[in-house]
Amino acid sequence: MEIQTETLKEPPDAGKKKVIVDLVKVNKFYGLNHVVKNLNLSIYEKEFLSILGPSGCGKTTILRLIAGFEQATSGEIFVEGQNIKEKEPFQRNVNTVFQSYALFPHMTVYDNIAYGLKMKKVPKDEIRKRVAKAITMVRLEGFDLRYPVQLSGGQKQRVAIARAIINNPRVLLLDEPLGALDMKLRKQMQIELKSLQAYLGITFVYVTHDQEEALTMSDRIAVMNAGILDQCDKPEEIYDRPATRFIADFIGETNLFECVAELEKDGIAYLYCEAGDLLGKSEGYDPNEIVYVSVRPEKMKCSPAAVDGFSLGGIVRENIYLGNIIKTIINLTNGQAIKINTPVGAKIPQAGSVQYVYWDIKDAVMIYTPSVNKIIEQLSATNIPIGQTRV
Amino acid sequence: MRNHLLKKSTRQKFLSRAFCALIFIFLYAPIAVVILFSFNVSRRNILFEGFTFSWYKEMFSNGPLLESFANTLIVAASSTSLAVVIGVLAAVAMFRYKFKGKGFIDAMLYVPVVIPEIVLGISLLASFAIASIPLGRITLIIAHTTFSIPFVVFTVRARLAGYDKSVEEAAMDLGANRLQVLTGITIPIILPGIIAGAVLAFTLSIDDFIISFFTTGSKSITFPLKIMESVRSGIRPDAYALSSIIMLVTFIVVVVSQLIAYRTSKKEKL
């Protein structure tokens, strides 16, 4: 596990990253519905980029804009440096794996996979060789003559992937390709997809609403929220240093405190929230500014007596055994439920006892929420219409 | 008690079978009579007096009868082809696009189906008169196409109901242009619907009398019109012979189309 995270830290060819897909100030409206808001996103060659967000956040629309099924209302999209605005989907060197697989029901597995090459008028002998190779790659040997209805969900998925990669696209777009599979198969396919991407050395743009999937597979994750790109960074950056309150809440489990800054001294921010006082990292807050503090359950601690700077008392509601960890739920005085994960074997507080929660200051993730005055300042400086920003 | 129930159920079984048999007799006896009498020696169709093929021979030397039959086939084939082309395009367009007046067009499609044929016949006749198109084979084909289009649209649309649009996007994504998507993906997938619509249109056209009566000229007589004409002087058995052949042709068309539909559905459902 340690080794894997180490290798993930540096995307392949980190030194000479080349942009392959570039979205510049892209906006998309469906009628009055603003689904993609002023999106700037550069996707690098050979990287595995996930676009992550809840349903309706505009992530699939971004994929359809790159594939050419939708036209951007404004903004430009470049693939390999070329503006693709005027290009039809069949003229773009990108291929898509659809959520519903979209296999051709009247064709065999072989004909499905060969379709792209046939359209490109590749000689028959070469088609046969390349289809055979693709079938081996996705481990569907012996299924050539079956029709899609004779395949299981996982097999259909493999056909859809083979059908797309056989065309040697520079970029492969995947729209929640594992959404319809059961848990176990999904885990298996995640690993297969990841190794396939490494083997082929092509860019994967992977749309998903499953944060765990995004965290395990991606070189970088672009987190979308209501049409806005909140953050685009390496998985561990997204997890450890979420840029917005939304991401802190959306990615993984966390304890989120809405606080007011009181004062800062020696790199420590003194804050208070509804349930009591707490400490965080100093980031130059003005007094009375609203700050969100996020603390992961595994970083959260508790003791029977209040620790200096903290006064978040509560009653232990229950201890839940989860195999390798025990999850303790503590209800604070304002009703907020705090989650603490403790490894099995470590000391855990007794249910019903009074406990005070606290954390190491370095484990507190500070999420800065600009005050209204600052937002107005920013807006007047950048000239962005108010409809396109979110507080 | 149990025995009693059992007894009753065997009686019910007998009754239901008898009822079923009656329905089949009611449906098929007249047809059987036509086929039988096409082999009858007697010219008057009251008694079966002996077996002969002579009416079939005579039929092939009956110029006007054969001519009317050929005309019927030409009209049916042309109007079916036209209705299929127009109907398929209409169904696909109405499935794929949203446009103003779609609901109105949708409702209007039912009109030729539900209004009495005689009204449709008269209105077509009036239209041709206003447009001063001389009545003949052309007007007949136009008229038959008119009442066939809705049937093609309905059957194709039923097929499209379960159609996944992303299949077309996938084809385009793989390099197919719009025409290739239509011919290679959309049409093969909706083919069973197209065939069903074509068979309906073809059979409706072959046996149409009322609309044909209003919309054709004296030089373009169809088979049903010819039969009707000869009824006054008494139907000769060679008309029976031709009817039997038409039945055979229709039967073959239906069987073949069912086979194609079966093969496609087997591919999809197995």
Image (cartoon, rainbow, N blue to C red):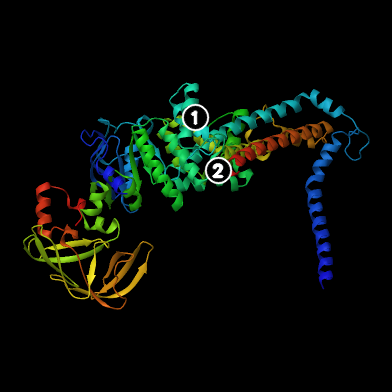
Q: Do the residues at discs 2 and 1 belong to one chain?
A: yes
Between B74 and A132, the one nearer to me in the picture: A132
Between A370 and A7, the one nearer to me in the picture: A7
- Is residue B236 toward the left or the right of residue A189 in the image? right
Residue A42 in view of the camera: yes
Above or below, A235 against B8 in this view is above
Residue named by callout 1 = A132
> Disc 2 marks which amino acid?
Val
> Disc 1 marks which amino acid?
Ala
- Is residue B59 toward the left or the right of residue A128 in the image? right
The quadrant the C terminus of chain A occupies is bottom left
Q: Nearer the viewer, mark 2 or mark 1?
A: 1
Above or below, B62 against A158 in this view is above
Q: Residue at x 42, y 45 (%)?
A: A189
Residue named by callout 2 = A149
Residue at the front extreme, as displayed: A345
Chain on which label 1 sits: A
State the image quarter where residue A368 is shown: bottom left
